[in-house]
Image (spheres, rainbow, N blue to C red):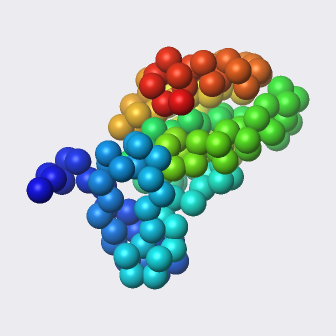
Amino acid sequence: MNTSAEAQVIRCPQCGAANRVQLEKLRSGHAPVCGKCHTPLLNETHPLTITDANFAREVEQSPLPVLLDFWAAWCGPCRLIAPIIEQLAGELAGRVRVGKLNTDENQITAARFNVRSIPTLILFRDGREIDRIAGAVPKEMIVRKLQANGLW
C-alpha cells in the first residue's frame, strides 16, 4: 500500500469529489478521471490563469511540475511567446501544468520571485523553483530546459 506522500488528493472540477491519485501514475503520463462522475481531473490543454490568490493551490500544491509564464498585456515579447505557451500546455497535459501569471495584476507573486523582466518562465517542482528562462526564446530552448529537468 502506498503512503500519503506518494499520492495526491485532487478535487474534481465538475462534482467536487476528492480523488486520491498516485503521483507515479501522474508522472508517467496517465490522465486521471474522477471516480464519481468520470470527468478528467487534469484536462488542462490550455494554460491555467495563475493569480496571487490561487498561486499556493495551483503551483505550490500541484501534484505535477508547473511551467509558469510571467507576462503582461502590453509586452510585445510576451505576445510573441504566447502561442508557444499555448502549444506547450497541450503537449505537456498530464505531465507538466502550464500557467500564465499577469505581472501587472499579480505584483505580489512577481515580486516574491524577483521577476524583473518579462516574459520570464519559471519551472516549479513540489512548489519550489527549479529553473527559469528570461526573455522571449524559441520553443526548442524551453523544451531543452524541460528535458534538462527530466520533464520532457
Residue 38's place in the image compared with 143, above or below, is below
| Image location (x, y in percent) of residue 74 | 86, 36
Q: Which residue lies most toward the left here?
A: 1
Residue 79 found in image quarter: top right
Query: Residue at (49%, 43%) from the top-left corner?
Result: 95
Against 127, residue 133 (above or below) is above
Q: Is residue 147 left or right of residue 74?
A: left
- Residue 55 lies, with reference to residue 35, above or below; the image says above
Q: Residue at x 59, y 37 (%)?
A: 68
- The foreground one among 38 and 86 is 38
What is the quadrant of the N terminus in the image? bottom left
Residue 4 locus on image (x, y percent): 18, 54
Is 96 left, or right, of 32 in this rendering?
Answer: right
Residue 99 position by quadrant: top right
Q: Which residue is pictured at 46% across the width and 22% down the height?
A: 149
* Whether residue 122 is situated above or below residue 64 in the rendered picture: above
Q: Is residue 12 visible?
A: yes
